[in-house]
Amino acid sequence: MSAITFPFATLPRTGNIPLTPVPPIADADRKPLTKKEISADHPTWCPGCGDFSVLALYFKLIERRKMWHEKITTVAGIGCSSRFPYFVQGHGAHFIHGRALPFASGVSLSRPDLHVFVFGGDGDAFSIGGNHFTHTARKNIKLTYVVMDNQVYGLTKNQTSPTSPLGYKSKTDVWGSGDRPINPIKQAIAAGATFVARTSAMTPNHVLATMEAAMDHDGFSFIQCLSECVEFHPGAFDAAIPRKGGVFNEVPKEHDVTDEYAAYKLADVPWPGQFGIFYKTTRPTKNGNEAKIIADHRAKVGDAADWQILQKNFDRMK
Amino acid sequence: MSAVAETPASSGGQPKVTKINEAVIRLAGNSQDGIQAIGGFLARLAGRSEQEVMTFMTIPSTISGGPSIFQVRIGSGEVLTAGDEADMLLAFYQHSYEGHINSLKLGGIVLYDSDHVTPKPEWQENYRHVGVPISSLTVEAIGGTGRDKGKNIYVLGLLAKIYDLEVAKLKKLITERFGGKDASVLNNANACFDAGYNHSLENLLKSYQFYAAQNKVGTQVVMNGNEAIAYGLLAAGVRFGAGYPITPWSDIMELLRKELPKYGGTFVQCEDEIASVSMAIGASWGGRVAVTGSSGPGISLKTEAIGWASMAEMPLVVIDVQRGGPSTGMPTNIEQSDLNIATFGGHGDSPRVVIAPSSVEDCFYTAIEAVNIARKFSTPVILLTDQGIATRIEAFPEPKLQEICQDLTPDLSPVPDHKPYDLAAPGGVTRHLAPGTRVASGKYPVVTGLEHDELGHPTGSPKLHVNMTAKRRNKLRTLANEIPLPTTYGPNEGHVLLVGWGSTQGPLREAVDKARSLGEPISALHLKYINPLPNGLEKIFRGFHRIFVVELNDEGLYGYGQLGAVLRARYADPRIQGITKVDGLTWKVKEILDRVRAQAQPPTA
């Protein structure tokens, strides 16, 4: 028989620290978090890395939207940008390479009370995790996914990434990359993402506005955020930085964000392309669909306790 | 069929009735003939009659069609296996007849469909042949539509007559099964059953009657191992699961998908195995242990994420319904060859818990225990079951659900402070805070696969890596201290000790019974806890001259099966030897004893 007897009493949360009760605080009595309270470890990124800007704007978003520590979950896979959760003072998870989206989906589907933010790089999103990107978009799971696209593998020191431009010279393509790069916006639209936007770490206000819109979207919201790797791919995004002589072209005001074909076409505008919300539509979320299935079933079982629901099945097996 | 007493027939024309303790019936046909349904009816009838029952089936891995068998053993006393040899073979086709006649004991009965089977003269002497035009009589019974769908129910009627089964109970089962459908379906089923039951069996000469059940156990439930695991998970309070289809795991996932919404839970079919394990881990982090599962190939894919759960100390339950491997292997055959991947399948030192249920009843309780170990020790737990136990049906005493069912709603009340990887925690056991919990100190934990400090922040410190590695290992040692030492089946001293794990418990016990009845000093020991092993096994081993680890896997390069190799490494005891096989079939009692007799030398005086 079992070594561990049941019913299993509520387990203490930890083995040694006596956890004295903490009185609850009403939301109204709480002050918005300051940057100091939200920031944790000092980022490990190289000086000048575009990711600093994304982190600072995430803090700003938390501040502005008065989110509480405990309600924020920051999830990432593996890569330079995926170090994100360590730098944020909140519940964080640093998962394995390429699988941040399914992990975050598990959080989103089981805990609808939380904000789920996923940060990662282009390798995590479109190479090792490519399958998950497609299916998370298709399932329309409520979470926000910010891909900090630097078009190179930085953490492993300069190999070709799935978004590296043709001809890009890396340690694995010393003669220049010959593989056609992925267009993340087209990929997201084709996969069925319901919020697809593009921004650049060099335009802070645009990043903040895009993240805010993504957070408010009911469904899978995807942001491609160009974020320069100053170490291995310097100057990659100069063409989109006005002070470096580039042009930051926003999505035209007259663009209909619900028009999938128009969005797809817009995503094909030659480099450096356009910035803003390409596509946004309302489609039932997996979260909503599951909640409805649960509500229908719960209505049928009525007030029955869990054991009584199970007992019904067992009665049929006698 | 151990015939015990024959009573002369009282009235003329009625066959004589022989009282029996048990019967082994093998039904052989094609996979679409509904022979599993007959077996299911017989098993449930046995359950309701407080008899013991065990079944065994083979299914082809083709989409539809192909030879299939279902064997059911019903006993008034204890039933430990589905039986080495059949008392009766029911053959629908020539291939069923020719392919399974060898499974019949000498003098056994072949009941065959004379519409499809031509009996062989050379077999007439050794087996009693009874031909019934099952197909045409079925067609006739349901009004001659020209289709023989329903011949399985016709056969059920025949068997009910031969074994004097309780017709009222069978009819009730038929009504429960077909009652919800179109009325004509139930009418046809009843017509088939009656036609079979009333078919004249004068040429069979005798019929049988079971003795009343000996071990009255009260109300029983009847199900297969996969169902027992799914219901065990529900009872344990699991409310989230994720998976990907693969035989023979899919049944568990389908059942959970259907049932979980009633409890407010969800099961997600994912794009692949890696997504499933990742999603389950994410939900576990959300505060309530989640489940994923698969069979061999899928477990291989999940290993990186399971390693993360070991490193991040995240509770998780992984069900591995083992099948023949490696690679795609033999998807519908039994094998116990995933012990190594379950125990050691991960890069780095990634301790995890591995437990294996021994019967269908044990599947139910082991699923609950897997959940509780995962929670208590914040660790991945792999539940190793197999194709045999997954599909076999057994009756067992009804669990007291009101006492057993657990509520695992996470505690989100605020805490003053929290260290998810506290090195000072007794026994190395720490647990996580579910997101949504406010930490008054303002210091929030990160769960991570990087080596980390006590708060979960990355570290390259050699000292921390040493201490954290020890923490992850020591908490499983803490668990080992809580695991009860198993007791031997049979005396705790003797010549030979058979050591088994998982679904082989039944055959090993039957082998012990048989050997002991012949005066051979053999006992058996069954291990449920594979990793960690219980402490103190060496004390049991000391009572025997020879120790054979009986497993359904290959003897490997060095002559031991997978558990055998672990026990050799753990106890460095040269008496530990392996008895293994990989033919994709369950152990026959005779096979085990033949191998033991061949390998065991008599004790030197």
Image (spheres, rainbow, N blue to C red):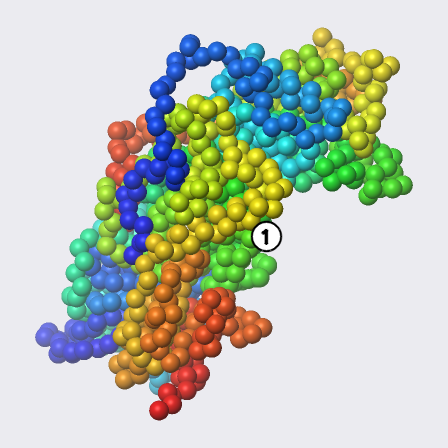
Dividing the picture into quarters, in which one does residue A54 lie? top right
The residue positioned farthest toward the top in the image shown: A253
Q: Nearer the viewer, residue A285 or B510?
A: B510
The residue positioned farthest toward the left in the image shown: B10
Q: Nearer the viewer, residue B166 or B383?
A: B383
Q: Where is residue A245 in the image (x, y as percent from the top left)?
A: 87, 14
> Above or below — where is B4 with respect to B153?
below
What residue is rendered at 57% in x and 35% in y?
Answer: B457
Q: Which chain carries label 1?
A: B
In-image side of A271 versus B599 (left or right): right
Q: Nearer the viewer, residue B160 or B192?
A: B160
The residue positioned farthest toward the right in the image shown: A175
What residue is rendered at 37% in x and 67% in y?
Answer: B537
Q: Position of residue B512 (x, y in %)?
A: 31, 75
Q: In the rendered image, which residue does mark 1 sit on?
A: B348
Q: Position of residue A233 (x, y in %)?
A: 81, 30
Callout 1 amino acid: Gly
> Which secondary structure, mark 1?
loop
State the quadrant of the N terminus of chain B. Answer: bottom left
State the quadrant of the C terminus of chain B. Answer: bottom left
What residue is rendered at 58% in x and 22% in y?
Answer: A39
Q: Where is residue B329 in the image (x, y as percent from the top left)?
A: 56, 62
> Above or below — where is B285 with respect to B107?
above
> Above or below — where is B347 with respect to A287?
below
Query: Is disc 1 surrounded by few (<14), some (14 to 19) or many (20+) residues within 10 Å?
Result: few
Judge whether residue B166 can be spotted in this image: yes
What residue is rendered at 48% in x and 72% in y?
Answer: B572
